[in-house]
Amino acid sequence: MISKRQKDIVLSLIKAKEPVSAEWMAKELGVSDRTIRTEIKELQSQCSSLGIMIESVRSKGYLLKVTDYEVFEKEFTPNSSDVIDETQSDFSDQANRVLYILKRFLLEKEPIKLESLEEDLFVSKPKIQNDLKIVREILESYDLKLVSRPHYGTQAEGNEYMKRLCFSNYILSRNSNLNIDSNSFQLLNEKLFEKIKETIIKKVNEYKIEISDIALENLATHITIGCKRIEEGFVIEYLEHELTGKYPFERIVANEIVKEVEEFTGLEFPKSEIDYIIVHLLGTKLIHKNTLDEFGKFDELGTIIHCMLERLKTELNWDFNDDSEFIQALSLHIRPAMNRLRYNMNIRNPLLDEIKRKYPSAFEGAAIASRCIEEYLEIEVGEHEIAYIALHIGVALERMKTRQKKTNRVIVVCASGVGSAKLLYYRLQNEFKDEIDIVATTNYYQLKEYDLSAIDFIISTIPIKEDIGLPVKVVNTFLGEGDIENIRVGLSSVKGYEGKTYLDASRVFIHKDFQDKESVIRFLCEELYKQRLVSKDYVNSVFEREALAPTNFGNLVAIPHPLTPVTEETFWTVCTLKKPIEWTDKHMVQFICLLNIRKEPEDDLDKMYKRLLALLENSTAVQKILKSESAEEIIKLLNES
């Protein structure tokens, strides 16, 4: 059994292509170098049973190799929660203790004495008191309280609905696809869960309803939790929002599902429990096919989508008004998303980190668009919901790029005669069909007769010595793999992105001593204000964006930026710290790049993001930047990345 920290160490090593030092991992995980070395020794002793090998590289650090992928995946699948099984959990790890205590408070009827927790967990009273602070914070985020009575014990008190949400979000472990993990069926009845799932699928098909796999899994989970709680005498008394007379379609479906569940469980569901199921139906994509056009322009959905389209157009210059596929996808997503937010139904997005990293532009667009929901409902949207909206925006951006794609106008120069010229022409057409438009095939001596003002570049089978003012790619008549790659390089350089620099030495700050992210952000914004590049209230926009979704991306890097583009040009402001600071939720950061984006967005914005985020995959580059002693050295390293 390995601890969460050991898992984090392995996942840190697997990302790196070069050896990683204990010092680096210690910074990332917020522990001492000595702790890392001790944990690695322990891992090395278990290597064969974990499907890995950890090699110590002198003066450089540790390198991990996977020796058995099947075993490795089983042990280290990302996003899968730790097993919440008190017979196996490692209680030396605080996270495991907290989940165990939380589970007991959520599930047990009788008050719990702290002495019994000390005995179960084999830890001291001060440790239990620290764990309880975290448990209290988690419960308070669901409006639940820990109430202690002398000589009697401590109990979690509050709304049963919120207890169930907390139970689902914290106690049930899920695999990387967000399906309930088999380990959780020690807490839930697996056969009952499968039966409920079958019932929902039957009703979904009967009423021609569209529902995603994740939503189906979620609904089945919550009804199964409902059965367990009703059986134990815990019934939802009321919901904050009165549902009487509302959502008649969802009520019919909920009643039919409940009728079948009552038959095979022998339980009785009161009206409040049926309302609870309606709430979960509202939080799924529960919608008749072909009813999308019936949504009126004055419906709240229409208002939100109109607001989103306007924000994306005015603030990022993305016009999706004519993209009916995007509008339809948003319509299907936004209504259940708003219901989830109304009823505090936290949804998890298994792809959150990947979306932030691989589709940064789409994620920023989604953060801006999500404010329409936030302002309408006066509820914080959260980064998991933002990431789902980002997926739809990402697809729409790809469609837009395809429509706007400029084909490069090319002249082919061939000295070998008509037959080989035709062969070269067809090979080029086949390889680059949507990327180039072959205007003509000609001999070298006839080239000067052509008007080259509308031509992007020349592909030639012979060298062209004189300067004709255009890029020339020399290839073999029979076009080998090297020639194809050579042309691809030519195409990308024609597209006009050639090593643009976003840095200036006056905006590079080295080895600063800040204790928290607020201080770093205020300092960087103040420096830009002194340089007359931003207004005094610029910092407020950066904090507003940070509140929507944290901008740390792993690898000790954070990329804060304002909510909307406001500067005259796009540029970076960077800062390295003497010591890492906690950015959010124990994620450590030591390199900060404040991203300032021009208010008239450029076409190469996505490439700029990708160039900057390439750092995230390269811990060696970040380490070099953190060790740099001059602004010039950092600029050189960032321009090379």
Image (spheres, rainbow, N blue to C red):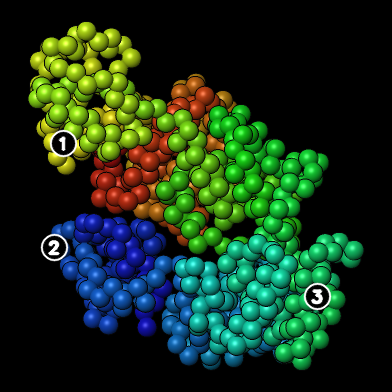
Sequence-first disc among 3 and 2: 2
Judge by depth and name the residue closer to the eye, 360 or 310: 310
Discs 1, 2 touching: Cβ within 8 Å = no
Discs 3, 2 touching: Cβ within 8 Å = no
Q: Is disc 2 surrounded by few (<14), some (14 to 19) or many (20+) residues within 10 Å?
A: few
Q: Residue at x 22, y 7 (%)?
A: 449
Q: Amino acid at mark 1?
A: Leu
Q: Residue at x 73, y 90 (%)?
A: 265
Provide the residue designation for mark 2: 58
In the figure, is residue 451 to the left or right of 105?
A: left
Specify the label residue 479 is tagged with. 1
- Relative height, residue 9 to residue 481 (above, below): below
Q: Amino acid at mark 2?
A: Arg
The percent position of residue 81, horizontal first and vertical second, equals 48, 73
Measure how far apart labels 3 and 1 are at the Cα level. Answer: 67 Å
Provide the residue designation for mark 3: 255
Q: Secondary structure beneath disc 2?
A: loop
Numbered disc in front, either 3 or 2: 3
The percent position of residue 310, horizontal first and vertical second, equals 65, 33
